[in-house]
Image (tube, rainbow, N blue to C red):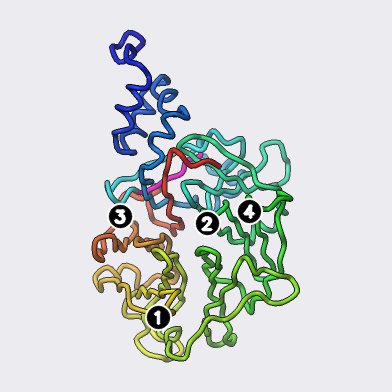
Amino acid sequence: MDDSPINRLPQDILHQIFSSLPLRQIMVCRSVSKLFNQMLTTPTFMDLISTQSPLRFLALRPPHHHHHHHHQRQNSHVSSVPYLHVFDPDQNQWLRFSLSFLPFRSPHPVASANGLIYLWGESPTSIESNRSLVVCNPLTRQFQVLPQLGSAWSRHGSVLVNSVNHRVMVLTELAALYFSNTNKTNSWLTFSANLPSKPRSPILISDSVFALCDVGSPWRSQWKLFTCILSRLNNNYNSWVCLERHDWGDIFDIIKRPRLVRGKGNKLLMIGGLKSNFSLNSSCSTILILRLDLERLEWEEAGRMPVEMYRSFQESSKLKVFGGGDRVCFSAKRVGKLALWDDCDGAVWRWIEGVPGGGDGLCRGFVFEASLTALP
């Protein structure tokens, strides 16, 4: 490789040549040799490609048993090298990024924003389970450890992130931790949550958190949409309010087991089974996707799963939904593949085959906008 004619070219010329390639091809070139990797990770080259759009992948969270390293020792078939598995909808293929550069045991990715992955990692020197929240870019192998948290937060908290000042929230039913790069103390701020029940599928959109809460009885669920504004978090009063309007009618009564997904722009998606009627144990006819415009506070139907596809999910008691923007994935036990709703160029429903690990269990995940210029 050292005698190759390409090495006789000035580096700035090489930078100009490679910067004209799509981001996918640049990623491939970086893995060709150590020389290419060094050349395509210099600050000068990073600045040249800073305007390139990120690649939008659908990333999988590891199964729950990957959370604990003693399970990995009991299951010899589990790979000792940790990977982030992602699906590229545009190329219809699975990719994987090694997480072996992290000095942690059992890294467990849980969220992503602005080209960065947020994950729980266990200290390799600690005998007891002591997890830290880590932010990293698997493409550049850079990472940062966020201030230490108690172990209960990693077990019971939902991690919410967005791209503004690296905002991070860990939310439970009773309390919330909040961290931002603008926080001069470099520590977590603690707030009381005061929610009526455990928050379901909480999401962070801009400066607001949204979550579903069950305000019904032990015999009948009644879901409501709650929200709070991060800049108004205060322990002196309840920051959460129930978001409702009279003209919404029975919007929460027609959906069974609803969950939230972040939509495109200032939109929110609510997804669940479309009830056949309003009886207590009503069956569902399909899966419905509703879209809420957060500026006008108006709902509209975004899509519904084709009946032939829904038959694969009909008998499953558990359904997992993940994604964001204009792509949402659906997973259920014993289906063996993922269903994808893709609304990038008009709503299309299709199957995703070849799920890592066989795809026979429940898959959870998030959107990963891969970028070579994102810094932890």
Tell me the amino acid under the disc marked 3. Answer: Ile
Nearer-the-camera pick, 120 or 73: 120
10 Å crowding of disc 3: few (<14), some (14-19), many (20+):
some
Nearer-the-camera pick, 94 or 292: 292
Nearer-the-camera pick, 65 or 351: 351
Q: Nearer the N terminus, badge 1 or badge 3? A: 1
CB of mark 2 within 8 Å of CB of mark 3? no
Tell me the amino acid under the disc marked 4. Answer: Ser
Q: Nearer the N terminus, badge 2 or badge 3? A: 2
Marks 2/1: CA–CA distance: 24 Å
Tell me the amino acid under the disc marked 2. Answer: Asn
Q: Which residue is mark 4?
A: 180
Disc 1 secondary structure class = strand
**Taking 310 as reference, is 321 left or right?**
right
Disc 2 secondary structure class = loop
Tell me the amino acid under the disc marked 1. Answer: Glu
Q: Nearer the N terminus, badge 4 or badge 1? A: 4
Q: Which residue is mark 3?
A: 352
10 Å crowding of disc 2: few (<14), some (14-19), many (20+):
some
Q: Which residue is mark 1?
A: 298
CB of mark 2 within 8 Å of CB of mark 4? no
Q: Which residue is mark 2?
A: 162
Q: Quadrant of the N terminus?
A: top left
Where is residue 57 drawn, in percent x and y? 38, 50
Residue at the location (64% across, 76% down)? 195
Q: Nearer the N terminus, badge 3 or badge 4? A: 4
